[in-house]
Amino acid sequence: ETGVTQSPTHLIKTRGQQVTLRCSSQSGHNTVSWYQQALGQGPQFIFQYYREEENGRGNFPPRFSGLQFPNYSSELNVNALELDDSALYLCASSLEAPKGGEKLFFGSGTQLSVL
Amino acid sequence: AQSVSQHNHHVILSEAASLELGCNYSYGGTVNLFWYVQYPGQHLQLLLKYFSGDPLVKGIKGFEAEFIKSKFSFNLRKPSVQWSDTAEYFCAVNAQGNNRLAFGKGNQVVVIP
């Protein structure tokens, strides 16, 4: 067990809707990253939060947004869902400040299907 | 931006066979390198990592990987696989000082008893 939990495990939405995915990190983990894993692909970096501030963003449009809370929980919000947003969304937390190279603890992911 | 290539997406082999999974990355600077594994029904977990020093790194469950800087490679090896090694294996890289991991597409490995 990694101590990182994500909810819900599965979600079905229709195109144009909005979705919020949640992640609970291990206590003391100040950094949380979100990844999108499409079928047959490796995870792709969406963004990272460190001490409640965005700390780096991948090649994803602004309709992907996030929040990190003081209680080590975080959210990924996606507006105006598109069919291509169907994927497994992974949350990963780490203990140290994001210098690069720190060990990531992954959750089991939320499988999002957009119809 | 960094990118990672993994070949032979599907690998099927028998128990006791040797396994080698190739990983090549593209980035001109100093990098940190990782192999992650995802067993069926489980979360991604770190198998091993390379930051600096000895280019041959040993991880959990008898896996090792060798960093060859001149070839931009970080291949994963295990001399004798077991059925329990059936999993998907991902190579990942980030630039030192950078906070984002770039993953390869993964290798689906099936070990037949």
Image: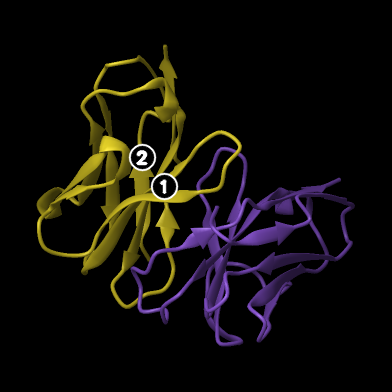
The residue depicted at 34 percent of the width and 15 percent of the height is: B15
Name the subunit of mark 1. Answer: B
Image color mode: by chain
Secondary structure of residue under mark 1: loop
The chain that appears yellow in the image is B
Chain A tint in image: purple
The answer to whether A38 appears left or right of B87 in the picture is right
The amino acid at mark 1 is Gly
Question: How many neighbours does mark 2 have within 10 angstroms: few (below 14), some (14-19), or many (20 or more)?
Answer: many
Q: Position of residue B60 (x, y in %)?
A: 31, 44
Q: Can residue B27 be seen in the rendering of this structure?
A: no
Residue position marked by numbered label 1 in the rendering: B104
- Cα separation, mark 2 vs mark 1, equals 6 Å
> Residue B34's quadrant in the figure?
bottom left
The residue depicted at 52 percent of the width and 76 percent of the height is: A29
Q: Position of residue A33 (x, y in %)?
A: 55, 69
Q: Is residue A80 shown above or below A44?
A: below
Secondary structure of residue under mark 2: strand
> Residue A21's quadrant in the figure?
bottom right
Question: How many neighbours does mark 1 have within 10 angstroms: few (below 14), some (14-19), or many (20 or more)?
Answer: many
